[in-house]
Image (tube, rainbow, N blue to C red):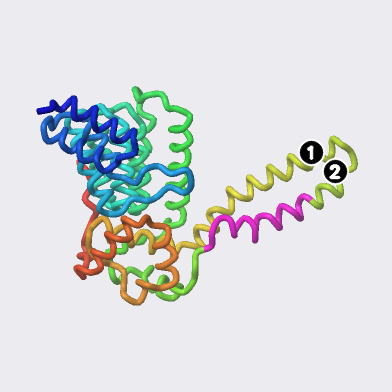
């Protein structure tokens, strides 16, 4: 009888030879013999997902995502210092299962293992924004700058800046009224109902239809007054770049306000997939704006949402997201 190590080597050979089914079968056999083999569990997690492709990546199904997540839980159970497993698990919980509450707890558990790493905090803030929990966002933002935190990489710094801007824009948009989709009498539902046939504007369309014409006019005027020399042309070019960047940044708030009804529907979908219960009125489900936001979701989330809809269980109006013990 072969040992777990020998079976694992056979699994790697099968994978290298393109026999994915046999590789998966052998990897599962390894963890049945040696449950603490995190290398084999990691392989099960990764091989449960669609293999990488040269073109557009294939998104995993609900079943594939669930199988991968089960294996990743084993990886962090036996090898909690495996940060890559934590990152992949967080992405699956959020993007492919839509389980925001579970993702918050997952990253909190990760913080126990990596208390000085900023990544778990950044990911928690991004989730809290989606849930409209801005007070909790503010608390996590403060923690990002605590003394003793690890020095951030360039990628982490960019992600941190992006999350801060996301929090700022969302908080400004909802300064007067934070949308609580679990409340069927919330006044935002009436606005969504009126705009259910209105698609959200894409950032690309916004730039082409509104920002580009303004920059073009500005550039034309600048060229008229400054473009007579080579230095003037260079100056105009730099002014156009600066104007485009400034206008784009300033106008994102306007775009977000224009699309608020769609962003509200997006949050309602998050509440449904996170709680496993329904809060979106039937008159809005299937509408133009609902379908537009659903297109942005992965097949696994859509599949899971269909199961929640079939169950027909309504969310309690007093429901609050279950947050970790901070």
Q: Is residue 22 visible?
A: yes
Membership of 215 in magenta stretch: yes
Image quadrant assignment for residue 119: top left
Q: Position of residue 135 (x, y in %)?
A: 33, 47
Q: Marks 1 and 2: CB-CB under 8 Å?
A: yes
Characterize the local packing of mark 2: few (<14), some (14-19) or many (20 or more) Cα atoms within 10 angstroms: some
Residue 326 shows in this picture = no
Left or right of residue 107, residue 207 in this image: right
Answer above or below: position of 141 versus 271. above
Q: Secondary structure at mark 2?
A: helix
Chief secondary structure of the magenta span? Answer: helix
What numbered label is drawn on residue 235? 1
How far from the left and from the top, in percent, is residue 246?
63, 46
**Side of 219 relative to 162 (left or right):** right
Residue 200 shown in magenta: no
Q: Is residue 103 left or right of residue 266?
A: left
Give me the disc on residue 226: 2
Q: Position of residue 189 (x, y in %)?
A: 36, 70
Q: Quadrant of the image for the C terminus?
A: top left
Q: Give the magenta part as a residue range.
A: 201-219
Q: Earlier in the sequence, mark 1 or mark 2?
A: 2
Front residue of this view, candidates 278 and 235: 278
């Amino acid at each position: 009888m072969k040992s777990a190590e020998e079976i694992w080597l056979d699994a790697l050979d099968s994978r290298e030879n393109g026999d994915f089914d046999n590789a998966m079968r052998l990897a599962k056999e390894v963890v049945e013999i040696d449950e603490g083999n995190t290398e084999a569990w990691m392989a099960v997690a990764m091989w449960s997902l669609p293999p990488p492709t040269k073109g557009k990546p294939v998104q995993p199904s609900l079943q594939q995502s669930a199988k991968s997540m089960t294996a990743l839980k084993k990886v962090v159970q036996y090898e909690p210092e495996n940060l890559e497993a934590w990152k992949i698990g967080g992405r699956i919980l959020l993007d492919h299962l839509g389980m925001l509450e579970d993702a918050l707890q997952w990253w909190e558990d990760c913080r126990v293992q990596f208390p000085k790493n900023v990544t778990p905090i950044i990911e928690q803030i991004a989730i809290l924004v989606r849930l409209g929990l801005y007070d909790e966002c503010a608390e996590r933002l403060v923690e990002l700058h605590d003394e003793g935190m690890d020095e951030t990489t360039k990628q982490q710094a960019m992600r941190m800046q992006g999350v801060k801007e996301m929090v700022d824009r969302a908080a400004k948009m909802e300064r007067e009224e934070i949308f609580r989709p679990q409340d069927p009498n919330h006044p935002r539902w009436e606005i969504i109902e009126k705009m259910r046939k209105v698609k959200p504007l894409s950032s690309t369309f916004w730039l082409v239809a509104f920002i580009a014409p303004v920059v073009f006019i500005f550039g034309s005027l600048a060229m008229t007054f400054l473009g007579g020399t080579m230095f003037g042309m260079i100056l105009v070019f730099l002014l156009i770049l600066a104007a485009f960047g400034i206008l784009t940044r300033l106008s994102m708030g306007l775009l977000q306000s224009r699309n608020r009804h769609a962003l509200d529907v997006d949050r309602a979908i998050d509440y449904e997939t996170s709680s496993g219960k329904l809060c979106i009125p039937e008159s809005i489900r299937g509408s133009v704006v609902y379908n537009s936001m659903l297109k942005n979701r992965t097949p696994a989330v859509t599949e899971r949402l269909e199961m929640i809809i079939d169950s027909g269980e309504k969310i309690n109006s007093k429901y609050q997201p279950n947050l970790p013990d901070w």
